[in-house]
Amino acid sequence: MFTIKGKTGEWELVIGLETHIEVLSKSKLFSGASADYNPTVAPNTQVSMVDVAMPGMLPVLNEYCVEQAIRMGLGLNAEISRHSRFARKQYFYPDLPQGYQISQPPEVAPIVGRGHVEIIGDDGNPKRILIERAHLEQDAGKLKHDVHPTKSFADYNRTGVALLEIVTWLDTKNPENNSYISSPDEAEKYLREIREIARALGVSRANMEEGSMRADVNVSVRRVGETGFRTRTETKNMVSFKFIKSAIEYEARRQIEIYESGGNVSQDTMRYNQGDGTTSVMRSKEDALDYRYFPDPDLLPLNISDDMIERIRATLPELPAATRVRYITEYGLAEYDAARLTETADISHWFDTAVGGDKKRAKAVANWMISELFAHPENWDVENKKSGTVNEMRIITPSDLAELVDMIAANDINGKQAKEIFIKMLDGEIGTPREIAKRYGMQQITDTSAIEAAVDAVIAANAPQVEQYRTGKVGLLGFFVGNVMKATHGQANPAVVNEMLKKKLG
Ligand code: ADP
Ligand code: MG
């Protein structure tokens, strides 16, 4: 369990995340304007009369956005509400021309209800994080304060684009139920899982850097062993994993210090200061806004049929959690390896391509990917900013690795030679592993008579060590293996060498 040591004891963290993902769709949630608000589009060119709340304009619900929300809900293993509503959340800010945001507060049955996602918890075991709800709402526009010395400008291209807000659930009635996020690392894993699910489903690009995924971070602390939860704070609008983790940690330490010096944490809304990694109060509970929610009279209640849900369910691709199970049960991979290989859809696709359905290959491919490929991050295009999903190995292809692994399995080369070939490929050497092996005369000697000659020579030349080995210093085996390998220019099959030495020395 992740804990923080205070002056008077150990504290644990309780974290709740409200994650906003921008829904991928051609048009906005309630208007026909394009939902592509990317920065290359000229300001205020993708704005309809509805988006800027011209008098008399009526919103029309975009059915595709509803389908996307259902798709994500199914990906979150959640209940889909057969009846839900939209309500107005009233507040004044210049990026919100309507004067209210159309949203789905908890009281009006959000489109997605209780669900869960699975992450690997800090203890290395799978952990369920409960979801309370996910609801559709409108995004706001963007204000630009850096264009003119005395004026601010508003760009309404993003106004009205559909957002899906996914809220984790803290089961306050059962505080012993630990199905919530309890460390900065778990927060990151949860967000990555949400991101991968959204991407696998085509629901969102879910890219923090471009703002298509953002999170509000709720944090409270309690003493280890304490039951019940304490007051939380909420840090708004976080857009990087690194900042989220740092904000959680800072906020937890700040709260611990308050409690330990006899104070009480108040339920404040915080802002995170990127410069120094601190949080500060944005507004206190007393200034909390009263949004005066009420059902939007311009929008009918939303009824979703079983048919619609089943039709969408039938189109779902395999999700990361199912992929993990497949790797564990079909390929016999360890839990940890399965988790690493499903971190992104591209990684698991790479793995699946290399394995090519050949079960015998799977473990070796997994080992090579995790211990070798991942160790060279310069070759992974990890966060391609443009697509948000491309995650390709640039130099070594899946078929290269498959061939390498097959060559080892067939005893054509040994592990050490494979590593050499691998490094040559990383360095840009042209050709397949087989071609490279041939180019450098690498082959494995499995012919036992050739190995036997080398083994006999090494035994004959090292009489004192042979004596020591026979009187119990069996650790010397490695010394003999090393010498035989040297004598065969690294080309002998180490397994055969081992076997033969043991027999002859034994
Ligand atoms: P609000 O509408 O005030 O944002 P929500 O009910 O939407 O409140 O909850 C926001 C998030 O805060 C949820 O993810 C919830 O699990 C989390 N949360 C609630 N209470 C606590 C607490 N004591 N400590 C940490 N997180 C909490
Ligand atoms: Mg909230």
Image (tube, rainbow, N blue to C red):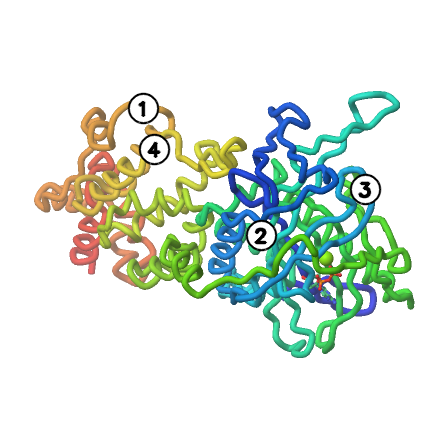
Q: Secondary structure at mark 3?
A: loop
- Residue at 74% over, 40% down: 55
Q: Amino acid at mark 3?
A: Tyr
Residue 498 vs residue 370, the one in the foreground: 370
- Left or right, 427 with respect to 224, comes to left
Q: Amino acid at mark 1?
A: Glu
Q: Amino acid at mark 2?
A: Leu
Q: Report the disc number at residue 396.
A: 4
The CB of the residue at mark 3 lies under 8 Å from ligand 2: no
Q: What residue does disc 3 label? A: 93
Discs 1/2, front: 2
Give the spatial CA distance, label 4 vs label 1: 10 Å
Q: Secondary structure at mark 4?
A: loop
Q: Secondary structure at mark 2?
A: helix
Q: Position of residue 89 (x, y in %)?
A: 75, 54
The answer to whether the residues at label 4 and label 3 have Cβ atoms under 8 Å apart is: no
The CB of the residue at mark 1 lies under 8 Å from ligand 1: no
Residue 194 vs residue 356, the one in the foreground: 194
Q: Position of residue 93 (x, y in %)?
A: 81, 42
The answer to whether the residues at label 4 and label 2 have Cβ atoms under 8 Å apart is: no
- Which of the marked residues, 4 or 3, is nearer the chain's N terminus? 3
Residue 14 vs residue 134, the one in the foreground: 134
